[in-house]
Every structure is written in structure tokens, then in C-alpha cells.
Image (spheres, helix red, strand yellow):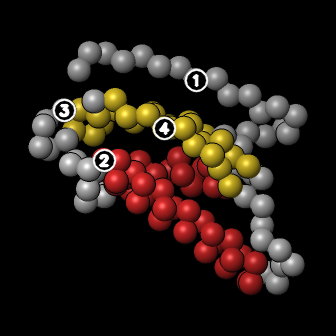
Amino acid sequence: MNEINFGCFCLEGGRGYQEDRVVANFSFVQSNTNKRICFFGIFDGHGGQLVSEFLAETFFSKLLSHKKIEFQPLLALQEVWQSFDEYCYSECLRVLKANNLPSLPVAGSTATICFIS
């Protein structure tokens, strides 16, 4: 694969802290094709950086360890997103109950990701 250059710009806006996270990973090689895959992710935090930070730290490795990633990458991606969504919701419920809160905590993230092979 030829050299890939990339850049990013983050703006915290009026908050005084950054809720967003950016990931760039060039290290994965598919065993069936011996091709290198690059992963880029922008995780836009909502209600704090907790979810976007969690996604930035764990999403790529979870996706690469999925059993369908090499032959059905779209299905693997859908299933990993579903598992993250379910996990985040269950964590919000756990925090709600553990702290006797009147409503679910406000936390989340949107994501834009890209694979290049």
C-alpha cells in the first residue's frame, strides 16, 4: 500500500473541554488476502466524552476480533455496532439503578468511520 497521509482538526466549541475522539490505525493485515486495512474513526461525543472515549479505545479491536470481519465486513460492522449500542444502554441502566437517578444519564456519541484496503 502506498503511503497515506491524514490530518484532523477538533474544535471544542463553547464547552471548555473536548468531547470528541479521533482514531487512525494502519496496523491490520487481512490473513486471507495479505492486504493492509486502514481504519479511521471520528467519535462525536454527546453529553460528555465518556462514550466517544470508550469507542475510540475499543471499537477497532472489537471489530477486528469479530469472526466475520474478513469475509463479511459489513455484517461484522453491523453486529459490532449493535453490541456497542446494547452495552452502552445497559451501562446507562446500571448507573441509573446504582445511583437511584430519576432518569437515564445523558451520554452518547455519533460516529463516522472509514476502512481503506
Badge 3 vs badge 2, beta-carbon distance below 8 Å: no
Label 1 secondary element: loop
**Picture coordinates of residue 38, whole percent (x, y):** 34, 32
Residue that appears at 34% across and 54% down: 76
Query: Which numbered disc flags the more N-terminal residue, 3 or 4?
Result: 3
**Mark found first going from the N terminus, 2 or 1:** 1
Image quarter in which the N terminus is found: top left
Q: Mark 4, mark 2: which one is toward the viewer? A: 2
Disc assigned to residue 8: 1
Q: In front of the other: label 3 or label 2?
A: 2
Image spot of residue 75 (x, y percent): 34, 53
Task: Tell me: residue 76, above or below residue 100.
Answer: above
**68 shown above or below 42:** below
As drawn, 29 above or below 53: above
Confirm or deny contact between disc 3 and disc 4 (CB under 8 A).
no
Few, some or many residues within 10 Å of mark 1 (<14, 14–19, 20+): few
